[in-house]
Image (cartoon, rainbow, N blue to C red):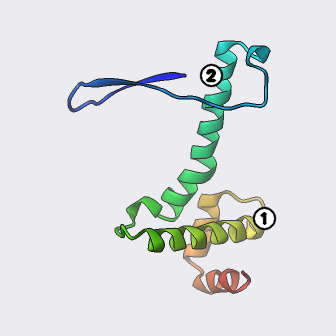
Amino acid sequence: MRSQRTVKKTGLTSTETRFYLSSAEPDHYEPGQWLGLIRGHWAGVEIRNHWRRDAIMGEDGSRSRNPQILANLAIIRSALLCALVEQSGGRSQPEIHDSLHSNPGRCWKILNSL
């Protein structure tokens, strides 16, 4: 798949070729279907994972550049996200965040259950 991007500040355009692996035969899908599958996968990754980690937990705001610290924080965030999903009762991440924000005792209870 080829993708093209333009940097707004400079107007410079670059093109990249990306390769994807699949267990499906190459002729199983039309090119447009392959594109939809690839974009759908990455959109899901962005929504299900990155948004929760960044918007809810502020992961991108970390000022550390120490790889061990960042890896440890990522593990803690992952464990916490799993615990929150189990405790959520079907509520959305923002709803969970709002309810816990005003109830630190419940936060400790969830953390202690890990």
Write down the quadrant of residue 34 in the picture.
top right
Rendered position, 91 above or below 47? below
Write the residue at 62% across / 31% down.
20
Residue highlighted by disc 2: 35
Question: Which residue type carries mark 1?
Answer: Gly
Q: Nearer the viewer, mark 1 or mark 2?
A: 2
Rendered position, 15 above or below 86? above
Residue highlighted by disc 1: 89
Tag 1 and tag 2, C-beta contact below 8 Å = no
N-terminal label among 1 and 2: 2
Write down the quadrant of residue 39 in the picture.
top right
Which residue in the rendered view is the most extreme toward the left? 10
Q: Quadrant of the C terminus?
A: bottom right
Write the residue at 69% across / 18% down.
33
Write down the quadrant of residue 11 in the picture.
top left
Question: Which residue type carries mark 2?
Answer: Leu
- Label 1 and label 2: CA atoms lie apart by 35 Å
Please state the horizontal and vertical placement of residue 19, each as a whole percent of the image. Answer: 57, 29
Please state the horizontal and vertical placement of residue 61, each as a whole percent of the image. Answer: 39, 63
Quick one: label 1, few (<14), some, or many (20+) residues within 10 Å?
few
